[in-house]
Image (tube, grey):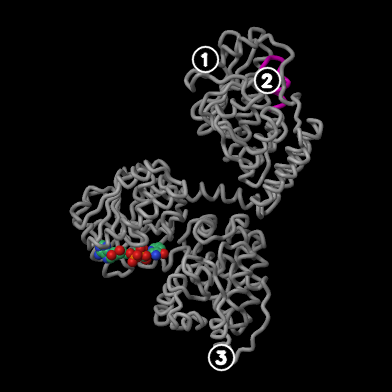
Amino acid sequence: MTAKYEVHGSVAVITLDNPPVNGLGHATRLGITDGLQKANADAAVKSIVLAGAGKAFSGGADIKEFGTPKALAEPNLLSVILAVENSSKPVVAAVHTVCMGGGLELALGCHYRIAAPGTNVALPEVKLGLIPGAGGTQRLPRALGVEPALNMIVSGEPVKSELLAQIPGQKLFDRMSASAESLAEEALAFAQAIADTRPLPLVRNLPCKHRNGDAYFQFARNMVKGMAKNFPAPLKCVDAVEAATKKRFDDGMLYERENFINLMWTPESRALRHIFAAERAASKIPDVPEDTVKREIKSVAVIGAGTMGGGIAMNFLNAGIPVKMLEMKQEALDKGIATIRKNYESQVKRGKLKQDKYEQRMGLLSTTLSYDDLKDADLVIEAVFEEMGVKEKVFKELDRVMKPGAILASNTSTLDVNQIAAFTKRPQDVVGMHFFSPANVMKLLEVIRGEKTAKDVLATVMAVSKKIRKTAVVSGVCDGFIGNRMIEQYGRQGGFLLDEGCTPAQVDKAMEKFGMAMGPFRMGDLAGNDIGWAIRKRRYTEKPDMKYSKTADLLCEKGRFGQKTGAGWYDYVPGKRDAIPNAEVVKMIEDHRAAQGITPRKISDEEIVQRLVYALVNEAAHILEEGIASRASDIDMVYLMGYGFPIYRGGPMLYADQIGLFNVVQSMKRFAQNPLDDAKFWQPAPLLAKLAAEGKTFN
Ligand code: NAI
């Protein structure tokens, strides 16, 4: 049973009991309506308490039922709330810890509400591209007042119950309990006290007005428009709350419902719901059971205090985990520590970090020049130069000193993790932790699973990544792992487009209009064009038949490595990140084009977007087929969290699904006809061809 029914004297208590957050799944909804019937039929019962067991009152819809018929099966949430309102005996919601989404809507349907302090109260539907769909937009403004309700609905952010209880005139909470512990008892006493009060108060009957309605909603729309960017839901939240002030309650409910259903079908909401599910899926590894016993990570060592080492260390310091950094020379350590300090100090200056927190974090950081000082660390992450010889030295040392059971991780972005593991006598303890730059900012962490990596090591690293607030995605071992292997194909298409007639700015603009945080050439300038150059030089010998545009090499030969040299595809002014087009670079591209005898053609934004994005998709299909990624949604997470793919499109795989894989394959066949492109690459990956032929999708 996911809802319990008990009678205490004259009070019936219906307790939602569907861990972890008492999601309002079908069985729970039935439990509530059954309980109401029983209580109303029992002459000994005078009033009813609706409570939540465990760690929540209710977190809202049951995500396990998302997209299944059960989510809508009767009694649906609207019917349950009606049943509560229609109860002839008063119903008191006793809310604690979490009262969100449908959980709050249910509480708003009750005749009375008592809250424990510290309860997180929210209507987070907007975060899934929706508006609340069970009366939230109509009842919350009536209970709380128009402005605070609108703020909560548009932002989706939780607010503590004690703050809400202080809002003048609010009718959301009739009473606050002294503590979470005393809530149950106080709710019983309150239910007894109001047992005979009639008529029963209903939120739907409360007035809902704003003194300066029209001006206020106009102002709200202007504010929201700026923030909502490509998402339709936030403005719909404003519309729905305005409807609450202007329409009769039942008409407002219909208006809410209609908008809720329309939003369900928008690509933006599909993308957000996809990401919500993808984030949860990514933390699960198909062959690693969820109850795998994890190793304890109480202290961390970082080898190398350079760009990545410093950022990696900060993640752990921020999470309160002590870090010891090792370098070969004291100067390198000093430089690394100074950079971390500077980083934190700028956060303090901008008011993002309190001084005492900053000192606390720095207090967790220590340094050493000797491997023997690291031996007690539970996890060590190597971030030294990207050379196999250097990695070999480091891992042999680590193997020598680290205590048994310590996890040995490498932040390598291109080297073979299996080979690195083989430098030790404990390859089962070796794993890749591929952070992205800047490592203290970027959300993505690719966890590289070596052939011999133990399951509990993977489970531990996934758990640790949550602690340091990263979105971790598991990748098998291959050149470039998931993200960089795909980006190479994307970059290659960018090069061909220059050869065929585009300027870097044209390509970047088209991709930025599509929604990418940055086009490929600005991204190259940020990451450093020399990195791609080094990879291509390797490719020219490893894969001599792979086709590349030569423009990027010509650029690097001029020393234009990007922002770090003040010049790349664009020019940069010191201290600024604005990309200023450079006529010489454009001329270099034109000259190169002419030298090859190519007549430039006008290329549409549509073609630019398709070639770049479908290049990602085709390579991703190979990656899926080879088992490097375990699911398409993992690949979407990599691109959303690590490469600035537009959130509202849900990642390259969901985007391809929405276009239709058949259409994607047709376009690829067209690109293969272009003599200046790479016909071999545009052969659809077998998995993609198969799904397209069967009319299926990746996700
Ligand atoms: P970096 O050059 O900024 O830092 C490397 C540091 O390691 C230097 O401070 C150096 O003194 C130290 N070091 C070198 N050999 C050492 C040894 N034997 N023992 C102790 N310390 C040693 O390099 P960066 O950019 O931080 O890269 C480090 C690793 O992270 C590389 O494997 C790189 O591929 C990887 N990576 C880099 C990314 C980036 O965007 N920079 C992104 C993801 C991974």
* Picture quadrant where residue 135 is located: top right
Q: Which of marks 1 and 2 is nearer the N terminus?
A: 2
Q: Mark 3 points at which residue?
A: 596
Q: Do the residues labelled 3 and 1 touch (CB within 8 Å)?
A: no
Image quarter of the C terminus:
bottom right
Quadrant housing the N terminus: top right
Marks 3 and 1, how far apart at CA? 84 Å
- Mark 3, Cα crowd under 10 Å, few <14 / some 14-19 / many 20+, is few
Disc number for residue 111: 2
Residue 602 on image: x %, y %:
68, 80
Q: Magenta residues, as a range?
A: 81-90
Instruction: Tell me whether circle 2 and circle 3 mark residues in contact (CB < 8 Å).
Output: no
* Amino acid tagged 3: Gln
- Tell me which image quadrant ligand 1 sits in: bottom left
| Residue 332 picture quarter | bottom left
Tell me which corner region of the image, top left, top right, bottom left or bottom right, holds residue 600: bottom right
The verdict on label 3 being within 8 Å of ligand 1 is no
- Magenta segment includes 85: yes
Asked whether, in this view, residue 45 is left or right of residue 208, the answer is left
Could you say where residue 11 lies in the image, as x and y percent from the top left? 60, 12
Front residue of 389 and 14: 389
